[in-house]
Amino acid sequence: MAVLSSPVAIEVPREYGYCVLVAVGSTFVLMWKAINVGRARKKYNIKYPAMYSPDNDHFNCIQRAHQNTLENYPQFLTLLLLGGLEWPVASAVGGSVYLLGRIAYATGYYTGDPKKRARGAFGLVGIVVLLAATTKFGLRLSGIV
């Protein structure tokens, strides 16, 4: 016989709107990076469907800055939107720090020197905040704390 668990009510705090606004802002960061890739394609004559250039590392740096952000975007949104249900203000701040880090990462990478992408490493602080908030939410929801 299966044991059914009782439902848990989740209250959405008013401050959760800040997390929603950070999620909206993240869309603008992605669009900015996509526009930069499009401009670089035109400037360096990289034709579709080629994802990368076999001989233009500057274009590849611009493309990688965008691609790396896309690779990490689902995790970011998941942590932002779930963690925000536990600590909405801290999650919105953490999400904003992460996005500023992504911008610094990209502008460093856009120089053509891949080592300069490390300028955005501070964005990881934002992810740690989001991880903590989401973990706390999961623990509370499961009844552990």
Image (cartoon, rainbow, N blue to C red):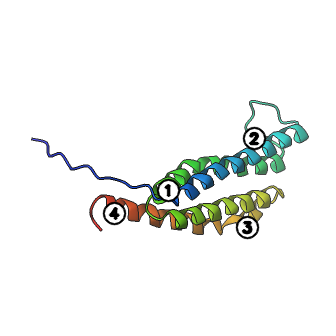
Proximity of marks 1 and 2: CB atoms separated by less than 8 Å: no
Rendered image: mark on residue 144: none
Q: Kindly report the distance in space between the C-alpha atoms of the residues bearing marks 4 and 3.
A: 34 Å
Under mark 1, the amino acid is Leu
Among numbered discs 2 and 4, the one appearing first in the sequence: 2
Looking at the picture, does residue 52 appear above or below residue 110? Answer: above
Q: Which residue is mark 4?
A: 139
Among numbered discs 3 and 1, the one appearing first in the sequence: 1
Q: Nearer the viewer, residue 24 or 132?
A: 24
Q: Quadrant of the N terminus?
A: top left
Under mark 3, the amino acid is Arg
Report the mark closest to the observer, 2 or 4. 4
Q: Kindly report the distance in space between the C-alpha atoms of the residues bearing marks 2 and 4.
A: 42 Å
Q: Is residue 68 left or right of residue 86?
A: right
Q: Kindly report the distance in space between the C-alpha atoms of the residues bearing marks 1 and 2.
A: 30 Å
The secondary element bearing badge 1 is classed as helix
Q: Which residue is mark 2?
A: 52
Q: Which residue is mark 3?
A: 119
Q: Which residue is mark 1?
A: 79
Quick one: label 3, few (<14), some, or many (20+) residues within 10 Å?
some
Q: Nearer the viewer, residue 92 or 73?
A: 92
**What residue do we see at 72% from left, 52% from top?**
65
